Image (tube, coloured by chain):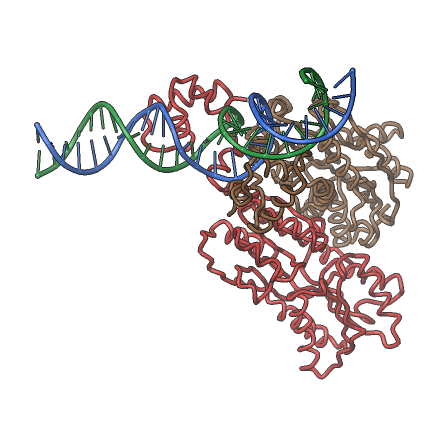
Chain colours: A red, B brown, C blue, D green
Amino acid sequence: MATIKDVADATGLSRSTVSRVINRHPYVAKEKKLLVEEAMKQLGYTPNSLAQRLRKRKTETIAVIVPRIANPFFSQLVESMEMVAGEHNFQLVVCQTNNNKQRELKYLNLIKTKQVDGIILTSIDNDWEVIKEYTNYGPIIFCNEYDENAGVPTVKLDQFKGGYIGTTHLIERGYTKVACCCGFFNSSLTDDRIHGYRTALKERGLPFRDEWCRTNAFSIDDGKRILRDLMHLEEPPDAVFTGSDEVAAGMIKEAKQLGVVIPEEFGVLGFDDQPIAELMEPGITTIHQPVKEIGKKAMEIMLSYDSKPLNEIVELPLHLVVRGST
Amino acid sequence: MATIKDVADATGLSRSTVSRVINRHPYVAKEKKLLVEEAMKQLGYTPNSLAQRLRKRKTETIAVIVPRIANPFFSQLVESMEMVAGEHNFQLVVCQTNNNKQRELKYLNLIKTKQVDGIILTSIDNDWEVIKEYTNYGPIIFCNEYDENAGVPTVKLDQFKGGYIGTTHLIERGYTKVACCCGFFNSSLTDDRIHGYRTALKERGLPFRDEWCRTNAFSIDDGKRILRDLMHLEEPPDAVFTGSDEVAAGMIKEAKQLGVVIPEEFGVLGFDDQPIAELMEPGITTIHQPVKEIGKKAMEIMLSYDSKPLNEIVELPLHLVVRGST
DNA sequence: GAAGGATATGAAATCGATTTCAAGTGATCA
DNA sequence: TGATCACTTGAAATCGATTTCATATCCTTC
């Protein structure tokens, strides 16, 4: 493989001059520039980016940490991030944690070892005190999940509002025993949603019951399993506010299996507004999250991050989409 | 940030010895080893991987090129690849082409510029003659999509069989006017599926019609649109073999909209066996592809690729899953 | 015509590691 | 006792680029 030295030798010029041509420095005589370009083509030369990165001290690579890329919400998030990154000739490294603290640490280490210029966290597994240490090595920003106390740039949605308007909608539809089935247990996002849920219940004078409030539900199968659980309670709920359309879809499927009629006997509310929400029968009433936009915005903030820690918190709007499941 | 020199200075040893400790060379006295480890901890030292990679001449990074990561098939593929890569402490760079030749070339260039150790192609946009040039710089392997003439390691499925058993199933269910709606136009995978489809038709003495055979369908919306098209033909088909469950789902949704009863008046066959196939009402009869396995296998081949171009072609099994849509 | 600035180029240092080579020590064995 | 071998260490070269600094030339401009 040809190196810059080969090009220099072939043209009789110095490595410096070749480097200047590569980096489009001014102050290179036009004829030498052409000479170098010709030689590069002749030799099939491409600069070794590892050497460039080592010297320039940047990698043009961003890591995005997700729980699971096959989860549609996160794959959409990554899609929009990759598009922005690609436009700026940045690479995107995907890191799956499976919500494992050790794996999250392993990936946070990418910034310490200078393998990436920045990290976008879409979920948070370790305590902030632990993650904080890594901010010394480069920009870390939140997208989707967040920690208010962290003081890092964040792109998020008003999850309290999500919980609130979703639950309020269920109540307005006439359901009185509203359950809640959210995602990660130890998360600001989940806490805020549940807070919104509880606030709506309280405002309407409806009871909150511990056994109606579940967390750690993510998949279709989780939805199925939890619906069965709920139905077998001594006092089963008559509606559920869920943390994702997958969980909602699983619940609807299982409800049909059990002969529970939706929405008449049981109301189901999703979250995200994934394609599946429209396809299900009945369609899933859900909270629309602008997934593409938050991914795009997060990457834009990352790429314009100029060592000036501006710590902005961007909150994008979400809204209710009513379909047949409520 | 501490460098290896700082550790050397702190311990009074040479950079060589520190490097030996880092790389677990034998022949380092136990007490010096402890001394170095202590100093590394003290200084919060982590080796700069860029420097390591430059010197060791490998990046421990693999690029996977997909059309779109948000497509569930590809996100599952990437998920399984990332898991295998992560176990071996390799990184995965995701590259989305949107089926754009230029973008594919841009990403193929990653191997030329030594930014990745290898590339897994899950779709193919440029001609093999063009891609071939890049195999000089490192391993390129196919996963899912393929080109028989290329002679590179390939993990694929028997797409001819997929087309054949799918179409045969439709015919056995009594449908006689079977349409076909596949993915990429210029692709061995699509060609093979269509070949299987046509072979099945021929064997049963059923007609093939150009206007029943569509390509470039990927999304739910494509499914909806094409179903409407097909229904408005002078002679509409009474069943369709599709290239993905998303397309099938879109068709089922649109059929309901048009008042076409599935499976009685129209049969729909999917491909992939995505979660949505089970969730739809009716469930989608589909060809199950072992997505996780092909991704896993492809990454395993990549990671065990020892400059010995063994060019194996791995073909994993696929099978029919009968549900309500046929 | 001297000073100052813009243009053009190359030698050498640098980024931060690994690797090669040479050399030293101490134990083992013929 | 001297040769061989295993172990241990460091100086210097190396990976392949960029950057700094020094130097040279050619215009302007006063």
- Residue at x 61% of width, y 39% of height: B95
Can residue A116 be spotted in the picture?
yes
Percent across and percent down for residue B26 are: 69, 34
Residue B319: which quarter of the image? top right
Residue B149: which quarter of the image? top right
Relative depth, front residue between A98 and B268:
A98
Percent across and percent down for residue A137 are: 53, 51
Image vertical order of residue A13 relative to residue D18, above or below = above
Quadrant of image for the N terminus of chain A: top right
Image vertical order of residue B39 relative to residue B202, above or below = below
Percent across and percent down for residue B229 are: 70, 43
Seen as rendered, the residue at the extreme bottom is A205
Quadrant of image for the C terminus of chain A: bottom right
Relative depth, front residue between A254 and B183:
A254
Horizontal relation, residue A267 to residue A74: left or right = right
Horizontal relation, residue B206 to residue A216: left or right = right
Horizontal relation, residue D11 to residue B46: left or right = left
Percent across and percent down for residue A133 are: 57, 57
Q: How many marks?
A: 0
- Residue at x 71% of width, y 24% of height: B152
Relative depth, front residue between B173 and B303:
B303
- Residue at x 81% of width, y 40% of height: B290
Can residue B229 be spotted in the picture?
no
